[in-house]
Image (spheres, rainbow, N blue to C red):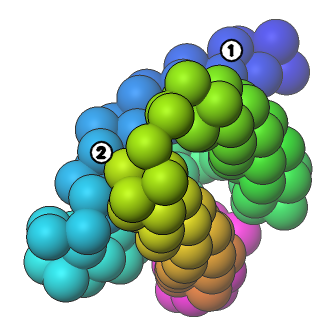
Amino acid sequence: MILSIVIFLIFFSISNFLLMLIYKFSTYHKSAAWALPLLVVFGIFVAYVFVQLGLRAILEYVILMVFFLAGNYQNNKKKSTQILDQVKEIDAYKFMSESLNKTSKYYILSSVLYCTTFLIMSVYFYNQSPNH
């Protein structure tokens, strides 16, 4: 029992770290087009490894991931507000505001895409495995 919790937490940490590396590209406006399919592939890979490790806490993983991503989103939103507060020129403010809004939208899209892909594929792989 304790070993499975430790494996779960290690898996969660590693998958989050790798996910945040992909998010660096998926929330950047110019690279989002190719990074979003990469998120889908990563979600499938993570779901496969999750089931192959014998982890069964699919819903718990998704719930933790949602809380983690929501917390990260809030932190990014606070930093964005601080950046905008320092901008003095109106044109620069408009540009920065639009850019930060697009980044927020890409972040939400990436989060929904990853969590949905992971959930669907982990249930699929779980149902396909002979061990359940």
Q: Residues within 10 Å of mark 2 (few under 14, many from 20)?
A: few
Foreground mark, 1 or 2, reads 2
**Whole-percent x and y of residue 52?**
45, 54
Q: Residues within 10 Å of mark 1 (few under 14, many from 20)?
A: few
Residue under the point 55% across and 24% down: 86
- Position of 97 compared to 126: left or right? left
**Whole-percent x and y of residue 42?**
31, 63
Q: Which residues are the magenta region? A: 123-132
Task: Indicate the quadrant containing the N terminus: top left, top right, bottom left or bottom right.
Answer: top right
Q: Which mark is drawn over residue 106? A: none
Residue 130 colored in magenta in the image: yes
Question: From where the camera sits, is residue 47 visible?
Answer: no
Residue under the point 56% across and 73% down: 105
Residue under the point 56% across and 66% down: 101
Q: Which mark is drawn over residue 6? A: 1
The residue beneath circle 2 is 24
**Whole-percent x and y of residue 11?**
52, 31
